[in-house]
Image: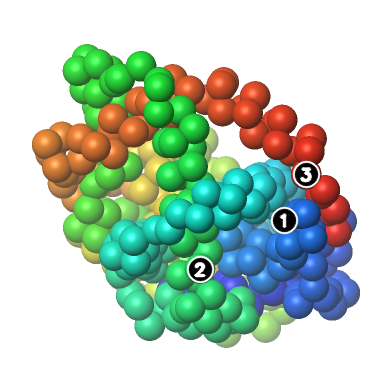
Amino acid sequence: MSKHFLTHILALSIFSSIAYAEPVEVNGIAAKVNGQVITKNEVSFLLAPDFAKLSTQFPRRGPEFVKQFTEAQKNVLQELIDRQIILDEFKKLGASINSTIIDEEVKRQIHQRCNGDEKKFRDELKESRLTMEGYREMIREKMVVQSMRAQQFSDAPPALPNEVQNEYDKEKDTLRDVAQDKITFRKIFIPSADPDNAVATPDSQLALAEDLANKINKGADFAETAKTYSKDAFAAQGGLQENVPRTDLAPEFAAIIFESPTDKAVGPLLDPRGFTIIKVVSKDLGPAPPLSKVRPMIEERVTHNKTSAQYERWIESRRKRAMIEIKL
């Protein structure tokens, strides 16, 4: 599974009622804040990882897909609205953000979203009708928000050593070098078009995959089921794939299976060519950085947590003053 779903995002993601069959406008205005425009393309790009993951996880879409997608869209739009409000505050100060910090954050985003593949990242930007310069500006704005928040609450109580250690223990897995992740799993692949079954349709193949997943979770042997039904090169080995680097997997697919338990079948997941059922055997996660290397970031998170209620009161007061027009 390697194909990204951004082309579908442009057709599906940016509208409130989620109509699947009709073309939608992708170049319009999502919202206005004090006269400044937030575009649908900006929302679309930030939604891309969520949409790809949800599309993979819910092949039939359905109510749970709609619920989770709508919530993700709402959160992204609110983030962009709040960002614009804070940018207006920042302009009054005449401050600036060091370009080196922006460069480092862009590199981190490429690593996180596309496993470090810059070409794929640029392709995603192109699909969303964004340039690298435009994306750098989005990152700059994100840095502004972080800077303004830190300045607004500079009198917050300092992070205590035990708070820093506890936060590090809680978050270190999210800071690890995911490019070094490896996973061993069993896989059943059911193609949407089966050359051995002329009457098979994508819907009947999906139903078959759902039935197999249910049987496996009720006790059927995964390996034997794979040998009987799977249509890929690993079927004869019971679907076993060992020590697969995370970088060999599509980001949305990797996000699902690396979060999955080892005691149940996951899926069927949407594949560009059909449907996949996965059972994780083991995970070999990349190393987390030592606390000494990420201490400033962890201290900032502790302070962020301590001031979250205060920040919500502050940003809410700015929201009430702002002229906000939501178009989605």
| Residue type at tag 3 | Ala
Direction from residue 304 to residue 326 in the image, left or right: right
Report the Cα–Cα distance between label 2 and label 3. 22 Å
Direction from residue 132 to residue 48 in the image, left or right: right
Image-quadrant location for residue 275: bottom right
Helix, strand or loop status at disc 2: helix
Kindly indicate whether the residue at mark 1 contacts the one at mark 3 (C-beta within 8 angstroms): no
Residue position for label 3: 322
Residue at 44% from the left image edge and 36% from the top image edge: 151
Q: Nearer the viewer, mark 3 or mark 1?
A: 3
Image-quadrant location for residue 67: top right
Q: Which mark is residue 240?
A: none
Residue at 87% from the left image edge and 74% from the top image edge: 22
Residue at 40% from the left image edge and 21% from the top image edge: 156
Q: Earlier in the sequence, mark 2 or mark 3?
A: 2
Residue position for label 2: 137
Residue position for label 1: 61
Helix, strand or loop status at disc 3: loop
Which quarter of the rendered picture does the C terminus lie within? bottom right
Q: Nearer the viewer, mark 2 or mark 3?
A: 3
| Residue type at tag 1 | Arg
| Residue type at tag 2 | Glu
Q: Earlier in the sequence, mark 2 or mark 1?
A: 1
Residue 179 percent location from the top left of the image: 24, 60
Q: Is residue 42 or residue 225 the one in the foreground?
A: 42
- State how many labels appear: 3
Would you call the spot at circle 1 few (<14 residues within 10 Å), some (14-19), or many (20 or more)?
A: some
